[in-house]
Amino acid sequence: MVNTDNIRQRILSLKSEKNALILAHYYQPLEVQDMADHVCDSFEMAKRARDAEQQIIVICGVVFMGESAKILNPGKKILIPVMEAGCPMADMVTPEDVINLRKKHPDAAVVCYVNSSAAVKAVSDICCTSSSVLRIVRSLPEKKIIFIPDRNLGAYVARQVPEKEIILFDGFCPTHNRVTESDALRAKEAHPDSVFAAHPECRQEVLAHADFIGSTSEIINYAHNSEKKTIIIGTEQGIVERLRRELPDKNIYSVAASFVCPNMKKTNLPELLNCLENEQTEIKLTDEEIAAAKQSLDRMVSI
Ligand code: 13P
Ligand code: SF4
């Protein structure tokens, strides 16, 4: 049997021996979150990676998060425990798709959700995360915005910023998009005196029943500050488990069974240990790839 205490100890001593910084996303398994220096939403993760002084940065998340860290802080060794941990939404849009949309709408700015490849970021004007998207779209001088790749997040932006014309792309997060309006109604019926907090990657008809819509860290803050004792969570299981532990006096429920991102769950303690021990696997981008994608990410973190 694997001795997890032993693995934890080895991770912590390697981390301090090598002076590595570990950043984990809230969707990571709790035991991985517990090994991190900081547990973050995508925006905070990008900023912390950009500002990190450590020579080794371990990103416990999915590949686009590691790529963003490399683009923002290219002199560092960026490691990701599992290179196969991709994001299916990021793979739904190609640079050619963006170039074609630009041809169709030459007067539009391209806002690219950070859940995208470095090549797609390179042909976009500015990146955003779910916590920064409204601020970013409002800050742009263009009235027309091509929003890629998440159609659900894009439709949410269109409702929140009606003064802009949002051109949607057809990408989506398979994990959030799977949740239906019936799931939301069933959960609310089962827990009548509750509030429902959902991530904007959910479908519009699910968000229509939400009392609060926000990024992962915003949902966590909302749950902490809500006067209600019962909270239904409309995002990935990592948040539900974290909130159950942080708020033992509240009742925390997931809006749907198995609201789990399989890619986020590919990272575990043995993989993290292997990553630190063997300094594998490293995110590698060419200088040209970094230079091309840097501007859109730099603009995001500076707004
Ligand atoms: P945030 O942490 O920015 O809300 O991102 C959610 C997500 O789906 C990351 O893949
Ligand atoms: Fe991608 Fe969705 Fe998983 Fe986030 S939750 S990494 S958007 S598949």
Image: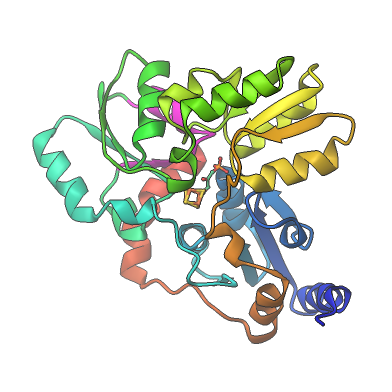
Q: What stretch is highlighted in magenta?
A: 125-140
Q: Is residue 278 left or right of residue 66?
A: right
Of 289 and 236, nearer the camera is: 236
- Residue farthest toward the bottom in the current orientation of the protein: 278
Q: In this view, does 303 lie above or below 296?
A: above
Q: Quadrant of residue 51?
A: bottom right
* The stretch drawn in magenta includes residue 21: no
Percent across and percent down for residue 269 are 72, 71
**Picture residue at 67% right of the left edge, 81% below the top:** 274
**Picture residue at 61% right of the left edge, 33% below the top:** 255
- Residue farthest toward the left in the current orientation of the protein: 103
Percent across and percent down for residue 81 are 60, 72
Q: Is residue 234 left or right of residue 140?
A: right
Q: In this view, does 201 lie to the left or right of 78?
A: left
* The stretch drawn in magenta includes residue 127: yes
Question: How is colour applied across the structure in the image?
Answer: rainbow
Q: In which quarter of the image is the N terminus?
A: bottom right
**Picture residue at 66% right of the left edge, 58% below the top:** 23
Percent across and percent down for residue 238 are 67, 48
